[in-house]
Amino acid sequence: MQFNDTLIHGLLIKRYKRFLADVKLDSGEVVTAHCTNSGSMKTCLEEGAEVYLSPVNDPKRKTKFTWEMIKINSKWVGINTNHPNRLVYEAVANQEIAQLSGYTEVKREVKFGDSRFDVKASNESETCFIEVKNVTMKVDNVARFPDAQTERGRKHLETLIKVKQEGMRAVMFYVVQRSDVEHFGIAANIDPAYATALQKAMKAGVEVIAMQAGVTPDGIKLTKELPLNL
């Protein structure tokens, strides 16, 4: 996934009200950027750190920038939660993920019951629903999810179980937008109910995939699968 526009460099002043961040650009101008990440952003929030913003040419939007990434310990961490589902969609459509290859039709944002999944992939013999989550939190060398309690995340797991019960393939896909981790696990101390829901989903046949993404100011690309530490 390549960025459509050249990103704009600056330093983070502060993040506030969950969805806003003040950034000092290299020009000295201070701007307010939209933060798509509604979580706590534990371990990827540091005032004064380098950041990159993407410009927004939408007269209806109050903020003219979107916060894309932050440099933590000399490595870029992608915090834009809108990108992972596009990354997975493109990778599945281009047959780039071995476990999810062989599908001839791939769609984004497809309804199932009262939910909407990020990706639906199908061929003549199989249908697969994929839910995608963005992961930025790091504990030691393990990427962990979630970084805040997520009732919506638990609902998605419950719906994936229903997908499996109806005879289709169900996949929970975690995109880790940082390169300084070696495993993926669940933050049961932050949301024990989510951890329990994931174990229930796995016992019901829901598959779990975690892949690391390389994040740079030029673009973001899925690089490798991470071992699960569940």
Image (cartoon, grey):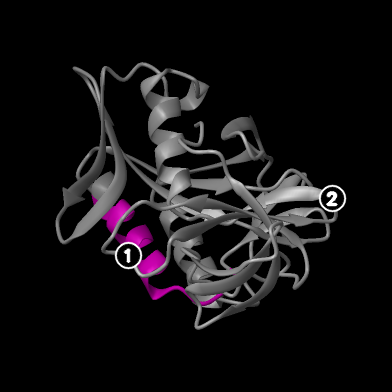
Q: Which quarter of the image is occupied by the C terminus?
A: bottom right
- What kind of element bears circle 2? loop
> Is residue 199 found left or right of 136 in the rendered image?
left
Q: Residues within 10 Å of mark 1 (few under 14, many from 20)?
A: few
Q: Can you give x and y, in whole percent of width and height, for residue 103 in the image? A: 31, 20
- What kind of element bears circle 1? loop
The span from disc 1 to disc 2 (Cα, nearest Å) is 32 Å
Give me the residue at 63% from left, 68% from top: 23
Q: Quadrant of residue 223?
A: top right
Give me the residue at 41% from left, 53% from top: 56
Q: Can you give x and y, in whole percent of width and height, for residue 86 in the image? A: 40, 39
- The mark found on residue 61 in the picture is 1
Q: Main secondary structure of the magenta part?
A: helix
Is 120 drawn above or below residue 150 in the view shown? above
Give me the residue at 48% from left, 71% from top: 38
Q: Can you give x and y, in whole percent of width and height, for residue 46 in the image? A: 75, 70
Q: Amino acid at mark 1?
A: Arg
Q: Which residue is mark 2?
A: 74
Give me the residue at 51% from left, 74% from top: 20
214 and 192: which is toward the camera:
214
Stretch of the chain drawn in magenta: 147-162
213 and 198: which is toward the camera:
213
Q: Quadrant of residue 106?
A: top left
> Is residue 3 found left or right of 167 in the rendered image?
right
Q: Is residue 84 visible?
A: yes
Is 159 covered by the magenta stretch?
Answer: yes
> Is residue 14 found left or right of 171 in the rendered image?
right
Sequence-wise, which precedes: disc 1 or disc 2?
1
Is 54 drawn above or below residue 100 in the view shown? below
Is 72 covered by the magenta stretch?
Answer: no
Q: Residue furthest left?
A: 113
Q: Residues within 10 Å of mark 2 (few under 14, many from 20)?
A: few
